[in-house]
Image (cartoon, rainbow, N blue to C red):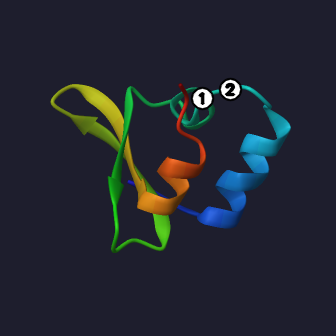
Amino acid sequence: MARLPVSEVEQLMERHPGASLESVLGVFEVFASGSLDEVYVLDDVAGKRIAIAPSTLKTKYRRG
């Protein structure tokens, strides 16, 4: 499991304008949690790589 500070994820998003949060993090899906202050990347959840991010970050980079 990797832990990424929100500031690091925001820098990554700035370097990839128009990209989805999922593609920048290299995950299948990003789930939101209101209680987190970091982004957690989990390598094998039901055979997929996922991330759990603070709700505010997921909302900020929501597409569509």
Q: In the image, what residue type sits under mark 2?
A: Ala
**38 left or right, relative to 32:** right
**Image point (80%, 31%), residue name:** 17
Element carrying mark 2: loop
Q: Position of residue 37 (x, y in %)?
A: 48, 74
**49 left or right, relative to 46:** right
Residue position for label 1 = 20
Element carrying mark 1: loop
Q: Is residue 36 above or below residue 24?
A: below
Residue position for label 2 = 19
Residues under numbered marks 1 and 2 in contact, where contact means CB atoms less than 8 Å apart: yes
Question: What is the total number of numbered labels drawn onto the structure image?
Answer: 2
Looking at the image, which is closer to me, 52 or 44?
A: 52
Looking at the image, which is closer to me, 12 or 3?
A: 12
Q: Position of residue 12 (x, y in %)?
A: 74, 45
Q: Position of residue 61 (x, y in %)?
A: 59, 42
Crowding near pointer 2: few (<14 within 10 Å), some, many (20+)? some
In the drawing, what numbered circle is on residue 48?
Answer: none
**Image point (34%, 68%), residue name:** 34
Using the rendered view, name the quadrant where residue 19 is placed.
Answer: top right
| Residue reaching furthest to the left | 46
| Residue reaching furthest to the right | 15
Q: In the image, what residue type sits under mark 1?
A: Ser
Q: Is residue 50 above or below residue 52?
A: above
Q: Position of residue 27 (x, y in %)?
A: 45, 31
Q: Is residue 52 above or below residue 34?
A: above
Which image quarter is the N terminus in?
Answer: bottom left
**11 left or right, relative to 59:** right
**Image point (70%, 59%), residue name:** 8
Q: Is residue 60 above or below residue 8?
A: above
